[in-house]
Amino acid sequence: MGIGTHTLMQIQSRGKSVPSLPASRGWPAEAVAVVARFRVAFRREPDALAYAPGRIELIGNHTDYNGGPVIGVAIDRGTWVAVAAREDGRACLSSTQTGAVAVEVPAIGAKLRRQTGGRAWANYPLGVVDALEAFDLRGPPGFDYLVTGDLPLGSGLSSSAAIEVASALCFLQLTRQRCSRVRLAQLGQRAENHFVGVPCGILDQGVSVFGRAGHAVWIDCTRLKFQPLRLPAGVQFRVFNTHTRHALVDGLYAQRHRECRQAAERLGVRVLADVTPAALDRHEHRLTAVQRARARHVVSEIARVQAAAKAMRAGDARSLGRLLLQSHASSRDLFENSTAELDFLVEKLTALPGVLGARLTGGGFGGAVMALTDSSFSPDAAARLQREYAARLGGRLESMALAAGGGATPVNPGAKA
């Protein structure tokens, strides 16, 4: 049984008004609502269900694919995926996200093709299917698939990684396979790198997998080590989504990746994380002006990540906030992945009571700014900033109060990744 655009539109129109079902099997209310949506779409029960959170990139802008450390925070918003097995080799994928077009794949066992246009969202779960074989794992023979959630797209909160991780958990449940949490993050990263075509590091998927309430996640991206870091007492997160996105953002991300790789090659190292500040001082003459700026950002950002981890272990929220501001300035001036909208927000936030620090979060070139605040930062201040943003820049600014939440999890009783 396939799913057409009409059925998808029914799901979208229901939104949060999907009838709530009595909680069963110990599932949270959100999971019960996802099952209700799946029933509407496919007229049967899902066989697998999983949740994965989005993330805030706390500090470590573009350090992950350069082999350096990075710190992220899993948030209390995320993505739900529900899947049911099919025996005919077909895959029918549906999303409740506005504008998403339902996708049907006639032969999931054949070589998968990337989707384009309004169907491109399906590349995230299809990329996971494609990645399973590389890790000696079986892909599902066919499936009906539904993704939903409360994570805004294009906001710098990594909705793509959340889809990949939740999809991987469901496919593993469906085929009764297990893998480590590190491998789970790698599955999502491989889907992004090799199928979607974005050369990201493991930050997004790693934080989604290893998140813990009240903590950040420190990642050694070379050794693939993941460590929880308790957040300083009383800190809060406020994310301001500009809903802007550079038209060439994917190409610009790949360009920055290429510039960093070229800089590492000219410096004679494998990745920029292998370069010390002193070594960069001695050998920067080997680099072009652009390569020098990119290397300066990465090397200094790695030092800031290390300082941020030290500040967090000491419970020093103010030092952490200052490091966030330094990180944004480096991203703006050296890595050149900020925008006028993001710079405006950081400048205005810095002057507000209760704001400890602020910076762009995510890949940049649009998206969102994250503010680290204490309890004195008020919703009224956020509302005033939204109005000033609209008056000055003419756009819609979304304000989200976010908390550090738990990591990805399968919901089916007894199912483990």
Image: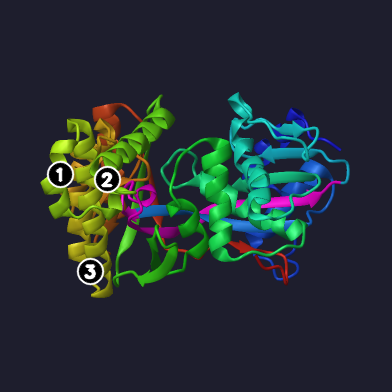
Cβ–Cβ under 8 Å for marks 2 and 1: yes
**Picture coordinates of residue 242, whole percent (x, y):** 36, 36
Q: Quadrant of the C terminus?
A: bottom right
Q: Is residue 20 visible?
A: no
Closer to the N terminus: mark 3 or mark 1?
A: 1
Local packing at callout 2 (Cα closer than 10 Å; few below 14, some 14-19, many 20+) is: few
Residue at mark 3: 311
Closer to the N terminus: mark 2 or mark 1?
A: 2
**Picture coordinates of residue 230, whole percent (x, y):** 35, 72
Eyeballing the image, is 28 above or below 402? below
Q: Quadrant of the N terminus?
A: top right
Closer to the N terminus: mark 2 or mark 3?
A: 2
Name the residue rendered at 64%, 37% in the picture. Answer: 122
Disc 3 versus disc 1: nearer the observer = 1
Residue 376 forms part of the magenta stretch: no
Q: Nearer the viewer, residue 90 or 189?
A: 189
Position of 302 with respect to 151 (left or right) is: left
Residue at mark 2: 268
The kind of secondary structure the magenta stretch mainly shows is strand
Q: Nearer the viewer, residue 280 or 111?
A: 280
Residue at mark 1: 283
Stretch in magenta:
58-86
Position of 15 with respect to 334 (left or right) is: right
**Picture coordinates of residue 222, whole percent (x, y):** 39, 58
Q: Residue furthest front?
A: 268
Q: Disc 2 versus disc 3: distance between alpha carbons? A: 32 Å
Local packing at callout 3 (Cα closer than 10 Å; few below 14, some 14-19, many 20+) is: some
Task: Count the marks.
Answer: 3
